Amino acid sequence: MYQALRFARLWLLGGLLLMLLVLLLMLLPLGELPVDELLDDKDAHLLVFGLLMLWFGGVFRPRTLPAVAAGLLAFGALIEVLQGLLPYRSAEFADLLFDAGGIVLGWALAVAGLRHWTRWIEAGLAAGES
């Protein structure tokens, strides 16, 4: 399931905390987010889900990435359902499409070799301990 990482559980915990942060931020009223001035809503969905996929691509083995992608897409759908229940937000199918686009982008970057980012960091930490 996990890559052979020294801190696999910490990397997983970090990813889950990032997901919690994303959930909280995406449920805030529009205009209250610091990124609202920097990114369009759709760009934010693309970027956030691309980074989440890349994060978990660095934690899990490549053969589990389809399950990771499905889980992130389900997470995106959950966010849209919750936004639809809030009086100050709205659910948009287009947001889910941009989530999927970000997941595909993050997956492509992971497969291209960036999935080793966790190993690179751990190797740097190990070198610093010597």
Image (tube, rainbow, N blue to C red):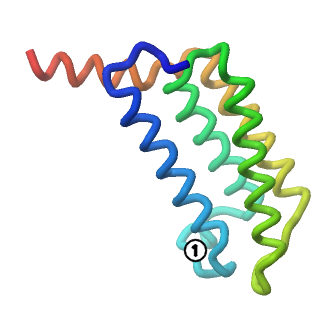
Farthest-out residue, left: 130
The quadrant of the image that shows the N terminus is top right
Relative to 93, say whether 113 is above or below. above
Q: Quadrant of residue 93?
A: bottom right
Farthest-out residue, right: 93
Residue type, label 1: Leu
Q: Quadrant of residue 27?
A: bottom right
- Residue occupying the point 38% across, 19% down: 5
**Residue 39 location, x and y as percent?**
65, 62
- Residue occupying the point 58% across, 32% down: 54
**Residue 121 location, x and y as percent?**
33, 25
Dot 1: within a 10 Å radius of its alpha carbon, few (fewer than 14), some, or many (20 or more) residues? few
- Does 75 sit left or right of 38 as displayed? right
Relative to 115, say whether 93 is above or below. below
- Does 111 sit left or right of 126 as displayed? right
Q: Quadrant of residue 83?
A: bottom right
**Residue 126 location, x and y as percent?**
20, 18
Relative to 43, say whether 68 is above or below. above
- Residue occupying the point 77% across, 80% down: 86
The quadrant of the image that shows the C terminus is top left
> Element under label 1?
loop
Farthest-out residue, bottom: 87
Relative to 53, say whether 74 is above or below. below
> Number of marks in the image?
1
Disc 1: which residue: 33
- Residue occupying the point 75% across, 52% down: 76
